[in-house]
């Protein structure tokens, strides 16, 4: 999934949590406005209280999940930006890196052709090897 897709999912979950919160509040309000009493009412209130508590816990979990997804999308954005920067920096330094290790000519071309595809996590490892640092520090 892309960060934008994750953010959309987070938004859908947040919307669902808001709807659940609204429905729970409406049911509770409607229940409080009923006028009947007795044993059946007490049993109804106890049963409803159990379900409302479950709905509140579910709402809290869904809201927390939505918030975590938003944070995860931000982290993924950071990692992808870091991998792009690592790829850019490694590609610009790689030929010199190879030359410094005595790899030239067709061997160097072969090594360059074997570089990983864009956004591959191997760019972070290559950045550490070639440059001594990575833009994804602490994320991969």
Image: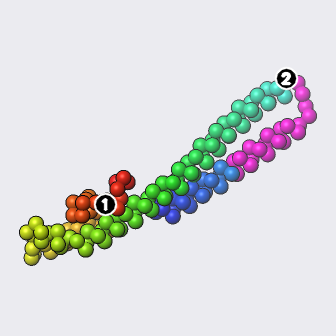
Specify the quadrant that holds the C terminus: bottom left
Camera-nearest residue between 103 and 8: 103
Q: Report whether residue 88 is seen.
A: yes
On screen, residue 43 above or below 69: above
In the current view of this chain or complex, which residue is farthest to the right?
A: 35
Quadrant holding the N terminus: bottom left
Query: How far across and how far down the image is residue 23, in percent?
Result: 74, 47
User: At which x and y percent is residue 74?
Assistant: 48, 59
Categorize mark 1 by other alpha carbons within 10 Å: few (<14), some (14-19), many (20+).
many
Q: Residue reaching furthest front?
A: 132
Magenta span: 19-40
Give the residue number, with chain letter if any, for mark 2.
Answer: 39
| Residue 122, visible in the rendered structure | no
Q: Residue at x 69, y 35 (%)?
A: 53
* Whether residue 132 is situated above or below residue 38 in the rendered picture: below
* Residue that lies at the very extreme toward the bottom in this rendered image: 105
Q: Which residue is mark 1?
A: 134
State the mark number for residue 13. Answer: none
Is residue 35 a member of the stretch shown in magenta? yes
What count of labels does the image hold? 2
Q: Is residue 39 above or below residue 7?
A: above
Nearest the camera: 71 or 1?
71
Verify whether residue 26 appears in magenta.
yes
Sequence-first disc among 2 and 1: 2
Q: Nearer the viewer, residue 20 or 134?
A: 134
Callout 2: SS: helix
Q: Is residue 105 left or right of residue 139?
A: left
Left or right, 87 with reference to 25: left
In which quadrant of the rendered view does residue 44 lie? top right
x and y percentages locating residue 3 in the rendered image = 48, 62
How far apart are the two marked residues, 2 and 1, measured between alpha carbons?
A: 68 Å
């Amino acid at each position: 999934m892309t960060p934008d897709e994750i953010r959309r999912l987070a938004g859908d979950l947040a919307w669902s949590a808001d709807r659940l919160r609204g429905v729970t509040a409406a049911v509770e309000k409607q229940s409080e406005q009923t006028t009947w009493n007795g044993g059946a009412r007490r049993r109804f209130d106890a049963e409803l209280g159990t379900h409302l508590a479950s709905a509140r816990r579910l709402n809290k979990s869904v809201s927390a999940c939505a918030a975590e997804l938003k944070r995860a999308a931000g982290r993924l954005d950071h990692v992808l930006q870091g991998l792009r920067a690592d790829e850019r920096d490694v590609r610009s330094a790689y030929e010199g890196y190879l030359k410094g290790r005595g790899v030239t000519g067709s061997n160097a071309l072969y090594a360059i052709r074997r570089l990983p595809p864009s956004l591959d996590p191997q760019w972070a490892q290559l950045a550490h090897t070639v440059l001594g640092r990575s833009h994804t520090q602490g994320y991969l």
